[in-house]
Amino acid sequence: MPIFWLTFRQLIGAKRTMLLASAALLPVLLALVFRSGGDQEPAHWTAQTLLAQFVVGTMLPLAALVFGTAALGSEIDDGTAVYLLSKPIPRAAILLPKLAAAVLLTAGFVLVATIVSGAIAAWGSTDGAAVLVGFSVAVVTGAVVYCALFMLLSVMTTRAFIAGLIYVFIWEGVVTRLFTGTRIFSVRQYTLGVADGVASVGNDVFKSDLSAASAVLMMVLVGVGATLLAIRRLRRFEIGETA
Amino acid sequence: MTVDVRREPQAESPAAPGQYAIEVTNVSKWYGNVVAVNDITFALGPGVTGLLGPNGAGKSTLLHMMSGFLKPSSGSVRVLGASAWQHPDMYRSVGLVPEREAVYRFLSGWEFVLLSAKLQGLKDPEAAARRAIHEVDMESAQHRATGGYSKGMKQRVKVAAAIVHEPQVLVLDEPFNGADPRQRLHLMDMLREMAANGRTIVFSSHILEEVERLAERVLVVVAGRLAASGDFREIRRLMTDRPHTFTVRSSDNRRLASALVADPSVFGVELGDGRVTVRTSEFLAFAQAVARVARTADVSLFELLPTDESLESVFSYLVQR
């Protein structure tokens, strides 16, 4: 528990958190703009454009990237990691509370943005509630997998943030759109698959490229795999003269 | 010259495995083609040992290997009988003070030390944190955020966090950096007391005087090699009695040179550039003789300067021996 609170305070106190809090207002603004003059069916626009493209496609990976790479990576960078690594505790007991803090903050920001903006945009729509529930569950599960992946990057490279940006914008944003077969390696697609499975709305409202079953299976594989690899990497982590 | 600490009075007989708190055996560490530590062997028991060497000599690499943070490329590092690498349980009996100034800026000194006590799994972390903070004389500033601490205060709170569980072995990397003279003395007294209670304390420094004041034993590391190790007084004597070079300007350099060459403390004299260059192996004897010789030769001394007294040159001399 001390490591969870330490990480939570560390992450919440940083300037980046204020920036993310401001960014969480953007989908709300978009929803308000839509309500004032949008001509598409509300549930469809909410699912397809607001939540799938903006929240899941941009906000969720960016928030996870910020918190996931900083939860342990910032301590490795500034040298404070030594105070945790020099304690008689298993490396998993260092990494898991840090992952939990990163997930809590990522999911917290994105969930609030999802619920508030989604409620505004889909208000009065028949499928609105189902879409909101589906995406709420999806962003929480997506936050877990993204954070695990980015935390793994932070113990593997000192340029985890750059590597994460490349993954989000080049791999998920471009490559998986051009080559549909690569979508099985995209956390964004897993998240959308979960949203589709939980929401269970008609194809005219929202349809993901991955089935819910495949998405859940891949989420478990990638999330657990990344976490175990990160723990293993932390066990063998060397601190040189500059760390 | 190597005075192996295994032959110090506390360890007359050959070392049995696990007899020493820290055992470093044929340890090397390299990064690509760069050799940071080159085949170093020593063993340390209770007391204070100073790891002395110029910046970049490999002291921190050696300390990081003793702390279990770096895997030796070859050889073994054992602390309290077990391998230091990938052995977190070791930290129940080992405390570490890293060189880097970084602390959790948003935590107060109290929270920082308490965190350390909690992570050590102590039964009464609050009492342990209070005791450790008292030890380093930080009670008055303990509730301020460490981000606002001076460098010396950060050093002290780092030491408090490292000793909160009363470790058997304490490893400190340049612990006196940034500490003012009073804090330095206080910290030295505290470390001496810990050593007197049977603890093994190793600290690194590039300042000879710090090591001289605190360490009973010294390991001199130069360019990744163990240049000397053993009793500090023995190494200090070698450093003092090494060849020294002085330049002298006088009213009559030629007459002074011929007078000095007859003195037994001098083994070389060279004239040129309006000065006499004198080489001696006895620093104190020469310092005492030069004025007497000049007076006898009726020569006035204008300037007497030692040359190349840098710590690096002292270390280089020890390596060459």
Image (cartoon, coloured by chain):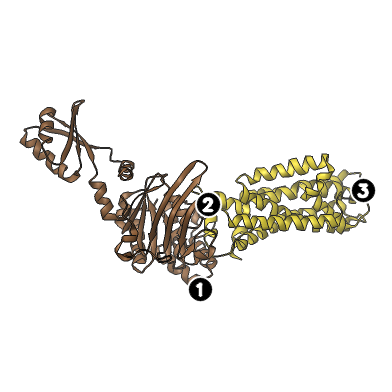
Q: Which residue is mark 1?
A: B124
Front disc: 1 or 3: 1
Secondary-structure class at tag 2: loop
Q: Quadrant of the C terminus of chain B?
A: top left
Mark linked to residue A180: none
Q: Colour of chain A?
A: yellow
Mark linked to residue A239: 2
Q: Colour of chain B?
A: brown
Q: Which residue is mark 3?
A: A41
Where residue B300 sits, quadrant-wise, is top left
Secondary-structure class at tag 3: loop
Residue type at mark 1: give it: Asp
Is A76 drawn above or below residue A178 in the view shown? below
Give the residue at the far top of this rendering. Answer: B273
Secondary-structure class at tag 1: loop
x 24%, y 50%: residue: B237
Q: CA distance from mark 1 to mark 2?
A: 30 Å
Q: CA distance from mark 3 to mark 2?
A: 55 Å
Observer-nearest of B14 and A231: B14
Indicate left or right for A69 with B119 as reference: right
Indicate left or right for A190 with B83 as reference: right
Is residue A80 in sight in this rendering? Answer: yes
Q: Chain of mark 1?
A: B
